[in-house]
Image: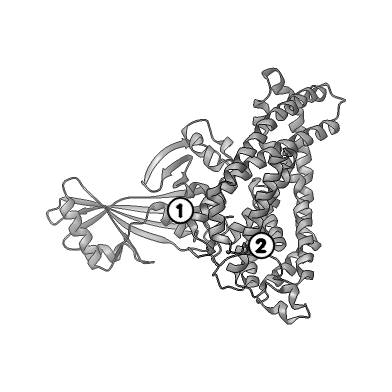
Amino acid sequence: MWKFALPDGYGPAEWTDFLEPAWHVQEEKKQTEHLVVYDTFDWRLYRQGLGLWRVGDVYSLNDLAARREVTTAVMPEPPVYVWDLPPGLLRARLDPVISVRALLPQADVLVHTRAYQVMDEAAQPTAELVLAEIRPSDRSAPQSPTAHLTIHPLAGRAEAAQALADRLAQAGLAATETARFDDVLTAVGQTPGGYSTKLDINLTPDMRADEATKAILRYLFQVMRTNETYIRQDLDPEFLHDYRVAVRRTRSALSQIKAVFPPATTNRFKREFKVIGQLSNHLRDLDVYLLAEEDYKSQLPDFLRDEIEPLFDFLRARRGQALQEVSAGLNSTEYRQMAADWEAFLAQPAGEEGKTAVPRKKIANAATPILTLAQRRIYKRYQQVIQAGQTILIQNQLGQMHSLRIECKKLRYLMEFFASLFPPKEMSLLIRQLKQLQTHLGDLNDLNVQQTYLLHVADDLPLRRKKNRRALVAIGWLVANLEQKKTQAKAESAAAFTQFAAADNARLFAELFAAPDGGGGEGVRG
């Protein structure tokens, strides 16, 4: 098969005339298909090498690298979540990939195709030519229509088809190997994988610390702004999650990258972002519990599983109110003013703060090369994590695991902020191990929080109805089960910390971040 890209407006008259008289071209059929590509907002399918699209009622999951169809399913209504899909192979393949994210139409196009039969001078069939033009379905949308001409050789006529391809190349047509999936996205101006919450900031070792910090903060602010609209639309809970992570990282950067901005500015925005984070705490908690509904039910014996239903009815009702409160907060004058002030501050050129009346010692790190400051801050935070963890284990203060979790989170954020300054292999290893420790500590913290919240909800659950009183029995069973899980989680957290604090990791942290005197060292860039 040979494929050629056609210039805009380059129709059959141009290339058919060029083939005469050696070949005769006869149109056989034409059709128009309405094709819609689906993926999550963060392109989870694409990142796994998969493409999902619909033509009519038929949904096809495709392996993009192999350019082959994996499976199909027929659905009269477009699915939004994986649980909207009928049981079968398509659902089984998508479930672990997209999880709770909504499937969104990422490209909506009309594909016009015309098929032609090509005859040689002896009137013998040589090949089939297919002209495909792809345009956005919405004519008012920005358009980058794509058109291609594909040669499909007939059995035993490969040489003749090759001659045909050579002739089209002589006509100035450019050969291409793009897949249909790519052509569709190009037609609507869509860039797959364009959104990610993973920090992708290329810092240079000698960059001023204030300039580098603003680059980090601008990236995080963009993540926040991107997710705001979708939080209000309530498409899926991950928009709120991504927004909150960006807020937490922002607060962490303001707190941990010290003496680069005037204290008044830093303190003001630390307060502002703390309020923003608190605004959505309740909504996020409710999302977590509602997403865990099936897991909670699986922990109950058969005779109690239906009895827990009033709990989730109660939580769903509360969630509706919590969403309204978050939306009102995001729409408030105070929030809009804060966002405008923050954006203006981030747009201010680095070094401008030093021209104000701020004492030099208050912004002593502003002009420091970011590599030096990054090493100093990361190694100090690493030492604090190790000291806190060892104290907890030696003194058997397992109840303090939550404070260790916070210290680990601060260290991880710093390492992610400055990852581009250090060798990627070593940084990936250390961050991966730190994430594993955080996961165990997070599981333990979640179990504590869940117990407390379930007991709190039990106090608020109206008991006038018999079903609600029975739900209390199921809640009590869950609380007891969570207590058993906590014992296991404590042991796993202690083991994970011991692994993270091992000598090999300690040497690697010292090599990357510590100077001979124990402070921030020179380090290397990968």
Circle 2 packing at 10 Å, graded few (<14), some (14-19), many (20+), is: some
The answer to whether mark 1 and mark 2 are in CB contact below 8 A is no
Query: Mark 2 = which residue?
Result: 221
Residue 297 picture location, percent across and down: 67, 27
Residue 125 picture location, percent across and down: 18, 50
Residue 216 picture location, percent across and down: 62, 64
Residue 315 picture location, percent across and down: 76, 36
Instruction: Please state which of the two labelled residues, at mark 1 or mark 2, is closer to the viewer.
Output: 2
Three-letter residue code for mark 2: Phe
The reply to whether residue 74 is visible in this rendering is no
The reply to whether residue 365 is visible in this rendering is yes
Residue in view at x 60 percent, y 41 percent: 496
Relative to 127, residue 287 above or below: above
Three-letter residue code for mark 1: Leu
Number of the label disc, if any, that sits on residue 298? none
Of residues 146 and 303, the one nearer the viewer is 303
Quadrant in the rendering for residue 437 = top right
Between the C-alphas of marks 1 and 2, the distance is: 36 Å
Query: Mark 1 = which residue?
Result: 110
SS state under label 2:
helix
Quadrant in the rendering for residue 163 = bottom left
> In the image as oriented, which residue stretches furthest toward the left?
122
Q: Mark 2 or mark 1, which is nearer the start of the sequence?
A: 1
Of residues 206 and 167, the one nearer the viewer is 206
Report the colour scheme: one colour
Total residue callouts? 2
SS state under label 1:
strand
Circle 1 packing at 10 Å, graded few (<14), some (14-19), many (20+), is: some
Tell me if 151 is positioned left or right of 45 in this view.
left
Tell me if 27 is positioned left or right of 226 in this view.
left
